[in-house]
Image (spheres, rainbow, N blue to C red):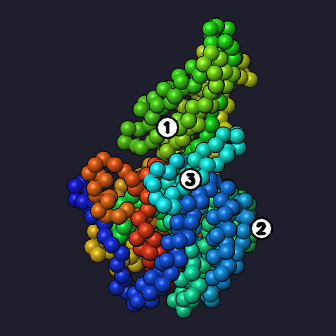
Amino acid sequence: MKKSLLSLFLLGLTQVSFSQVNKELVDKAVAKDNAKFVEIFKDIHENPELGFMEFRTAGIMAKELKSYGYKVIEGIAKTGVAGVIENGKGPIVMYRADMDCNAVKETTGLPYASKKVVKLEGGTETPVMHACGHDAHVTWLLAVAKFFAENKNLWKGTVIFVGQPAEEPITGAEAMVNDGLYTKHGIPEPDYLFGIHTAPIGVGIVAAASGVRMAGTDQFDVTFYGVGGHGSTPNLSKDPILMAASAIMSYQSIVSRGIDPKNSAVITVGSVQAGSDNNVIPETALLKVNLRWFTEKDRQTMIEGIKRINEGIAYSYDLPKEKYPTINFKGWAHPLDNEQKLTKVVRESLKGLVTDPRFLLDETILPSIMGSEDFHHLIIHNEKKDYCYINVGIAEPKRFAESFKEGKVPFNAHNGDFEIDLSAIPFGSKVGITSMLAIFNQ
C-alpha cells in the first residue's frame, strides 16, 4: 500500500454534516435518534447469534420495522426479515443488512462485550461474537428505515429493508430467494440493491468503488475414509489423517502450478477434524475447505484439482471405490461486481459527508480484495441485477493509528479484539440515508 493511501487510512475524521439541501433535516434526525440506535447496537452486540439462529436479532428488526409503519414478513429462510413501504410511483430499492455473528471469543473487554456460548449441531460448544460488524449493519439499516418512514416527501417508489441470515457461511441470500422471497413471500423484485459493510479504517472514510470488488467463494467439506485401528499397528489400518495431511499440502500446488500467476486465487483448509484418542487411528478425517477466485475457469481448476488429488490419494492407499473421499458443497458466491453507474450515483452523493475528497475512496485507489459476500445473490437470478455495496470506516482514528504503528489489528474483522467505535453508528446512518435518497432521486 502506498504511503499516501496509508496516511489516509490512518487519519480518519469525526462525523460531519452534509452540504446538500437536506443537510439540517438529516443531521437533526440522526442526532435525535442516535442514543436509541447506539443502545440497539450494544444490545445486538452483547447477544450475537450464528447463521440461521438469529431469532432474537430478527425479532428486534421486525419489531422496529413494524413500529415505523412497514409491512413486515418474518421467517424467510427460517430467520430472514423483510419490511416494505410503498410510497407512490418510482423505483423499487432494496437495502440489505446481514445479521449473523462469528464463532470467535470476544476479548475486547467492552462493558457490552459478548459472553455468549452456543451449542452447535454436533454437540460441541463455541463462544460467539459480532467480529465482522453485522451488529452495526443491522443498526444502520434500522436508522435508515426509520428516516425513510418519517420523510416520505423526500422519495417516491417502494423501499424494502431486508435482514439476511447466514452471510458468514455464504448461504443466507440464496436461502431467502429459494424460500420464495419474491414468490411465496411476495417481496417486489427490486430495481436496485444497496448495502454497507464495515471497514477497519477511520470513522469518516467511505469506500464506494465500482467494478469487481470481492472474490467469488466456495465452502465445502472433504471427508477421507480409512480403516481404523490401534496406533501400534498402522500396517493393519489405513490412516485417514495421513491422507488428509497429504491432501492439505497437495492442494496448494493447484494454485501455485495450475492457476495463471497473474490471477488471484486461494485454497484454505480452515479446519481439520479427526479422531479423539492418542493411540487410535480413526476411520475418517474431515477437512473444511474454502476457495477464493475471480474467474469461473480458476474456480473449476481448483475444484477439479481437489477432486483428482483426493481420488489419487485414495487410489494410492488401495481403497475400494465406495471409500473414496466425498465432497459436501455448502455455501458459494459469485464475485461481487458493483454496477458502475449506480455506484457513481452513490459516491457523488457522499462527497458532502467527508472533510476531504480523498476520504471518499473509489476503484482508482482501492484494489479488489479476496474477501467474499453473498449480498448480491439476493438479485443475481432476477432480470434486474444492478447493485452497489460500499464500506464505511468504524475505527476511532487516533486509536487506529496507534494500533497500526504497534502492529495490532483491533479493528480488523474476525478477531476477538474487533471493535466498532460508537461514533460510527451516526456516521454510518448518514451514509445509508444519503445513499438511499440518491438512488431514489437519481
The picture places residue 331, in percent across and down from the top left corner, at 62, 48
* Residue, disc 3: 115
The picture places residue 269, in percent across and down from the top left corner, at 52, 35
The picture places residue 120, in percent across and down from the top left corner, at 67, 45
Which mark is first along the chain, 1 or 3? 3
Q: Say if mark 2 contacts mark 1, CB within 8 Å.
A: no
Residue at (53% x, 77% y) in the render = 36
Secondary element type, mark 2: loop
* Residue, disc 2: 184
In space, the residues marked 2 and 1 are separated at their CA atoms by: 37 Å
Q: Say if mark 3 contacts mark 1, CB within 8 Å.
A: no
Type of amino acid at the residue the image marks with label 2? Lys
Secondary element type, mark 3: loop
Residue at (39% x, 53% y) in the render = 410
Type of amino acid at the residue the image marks with label 3? Lys
Camera-nearest residue between 255 and 109: 109
Closer to the eye: label 2 or 3: 3
Give the farthest residue toward the bottom: 153
Indicate left or right for 13 with 153 as reference. left
* Residue, disc 1: 267
In space, the residues marked 3 and 1 are separated at their CA atoms by: 32 Å
